[in-house]
Amino acid sequence: MIGRNAWRPWLPAMGGCLQAGIFCLFFCVALIASAAVALRPNKDCLDCHEDKELTKTNAQGRAISLYVDAALLARSVHRTNLCMSCHADITEKHPDDGLAVKPARCEACHASQTASFGASVHGLALQEGKQGAPGCADCHGQHDILPPTVIDSPLHWSKLGQTCGECHPEAAAQVKDSVHGRAVARGVREAATCTDCHSEHRIETLKGSAALKVSGDVCGKCHASERINSKFRLPANRVKTFYESYHGLAVQSGYARAANCSSCHGYHEILPSTDPRSSIHPRHLPETCGKCHPGATAKFVEGKIHVDLDEPSDLAARVNFWVRRIYLALIFGVVGAMLIHNALAWWRKLLALRQAAGPLVERMDRHQRWQHGLLLASFVVLAVSGFALKFPESRLAWLFGADEEIRRWVHRVAGLVLLGVGGWHLGYIIFFAQGRRLWRDLLWRAGDLRQMLAATRHWLTGRGSEPEAGRFSYVEKIEYWAVIWGTVIMGITGLVIWFKMEVTHWLPRWVIEVATTIHYYEAILACLAIVVWHFYHVIFDPDVYPMNLAWWDGRVPKRWLEQHHPQDPALRQNPEADKKDTPKNNAAQDQ
């Protein structure tokens, strides 16, 4: 137990701490008091600025009113702000210090909007010091700033024409008389206003803009909208048919001089084709088209830009529609018949070429051929459906229709087939003598590396000859082990993605993202490896071109096997091959 006098040695230290605490308290109070003095109440400012006759003379000698209507300030969005929150440069001695007050610093509270405005045509003009360039207050107001949703705000959608028209009176008058301006006057909220085309804070001039930007980002923003088109009974195909026209195709290719929407319809004074003043009125079409096509006649302008082949009331569209149908049938019929004819001829000539090569030797048994066939089919379906899932806007996705569910289940079923083939192959190499022998022959050995180096030296220098190989060379072994690697990786990651809900019971969500990334890039690797490595050795290699048919019936020409795999045991196990597999017998068998 601590005695009563045990605290006495600590009393001086405690007294020091108490004094320090009291000092800090008074210091904080002093800071708060000084801040309160620095941020003077609005009443101090309004004592002078409520005088309607209070003015100052600017550098141009004009009298500028400094009157602030307290009632308007109380309604504004800044009604809870102090004057010094915006006019932070005002000192305690104002106005006796004789220093002119700087404009309000909007960026202190509106940093992102200020940054966007700085990159606009107005902001750049201010930075260049151009006289009359508008700032924030010119559009938003000064002490009477209201939300743009309030009808009294100068930025309300119905007032934008008036606000922008103070600096752009000619453009504002043209817009007011246009289809857009008339719609605004009728109270149509969806009608295009100045900021819908030129943006809000990052206001940009559209003169000299890329044609694709004007057609897609500006006009297409509304005229490709199903909601707007259906609500106001506007043609729903104007953007689509423009892009399908010569002008639209040229715009998409990046041609700078290609006609866009504004080239024909105008910029601000956009009028309906029924208005005699419209640039697309039938009477003015030769002049409008003649800007790009000198000498345009009345017959020339009869052609339509927005041609919709499904429009029943248009004779030209109906003629085009049936011409297209007839030609599509002709193309598929004629070219399809040609394709079938050539395929049959190619196949028969391939068999004849193979028979002429001499006796045949079995290289793949029935199990191996079926495994290869299912592997081939499942791999192709997996590749097509997988990339269709990754790129749903591509033509690959179109093969499976518009339903993503179909693409997903086709991919999953093909994946199960691939895994089933892997299981079948595993059982084959365990339980069948041919499978065990296949496994032993496909194992890597030191001689394979020497063979690879010798082959590379031969391909580079042309010296020596292609090294002899046993049943399988390093080429087949690379293919075989690449398939095993890919099947394991794609199988594991595919199952993780498929059963993500179950996996995330045990593992974090980011594991699914990593598995998806591995699955995607492994698919690219596998497809490229098949095209670059496997297709060359079984199709494009001059020694087997146009195709190695071992996948079909398991047999290869004995002469080819003796040249490339002289140590293959099949050559010793088929002593009667020369007698049985003569060209005559092969021809009879293939028939």
Image (cartoon, rainbow, N blue to C red):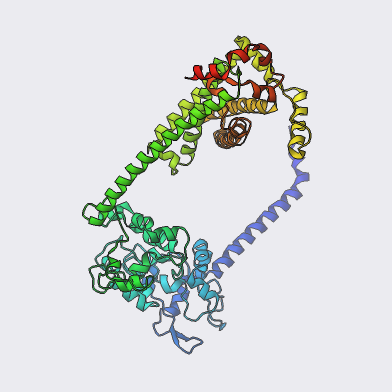
In the image, residue 456 sits, relative to residue 91, either above or below, namely: above
43 or 503, nearer to the observer: 503
Percent x, y for residue 104?
Answer: 50, 72
In the image, residue 489 sits, relative to residue 26, either above or below, namely: above
390 or 150, nearer to the observer: 390
- In the picture, measured across the screen, residue 317 lies left or right of residue 194, that is left
340 or 177, nearer to the observer: 340
Identify the image quadrant of residue 430.
top right
Percent x, y for residue 208?
Answer: 46, 70
Going by the picture, which residue comes out furthest to the front? 584
Residue at image point 46% right, 37% down: 389
Going by the picture, which residue comes out furthest to the left? 313
Residue at image point 66% right, 15% down: 570
385 or 348, nearer to the observer: 348
Asked whether residue 498 is in view, the answer is: no
- In the picture, measured across the screen, residue 481 lies left or right of residue 590, that is right
Q: Which quadrant of the figure contains the N terminus?
A: top right
Percent x, y for residue 252?
Answer: 44, 58
In the image, residue 416 sits, relative to residue 254, either above or below, namely: above
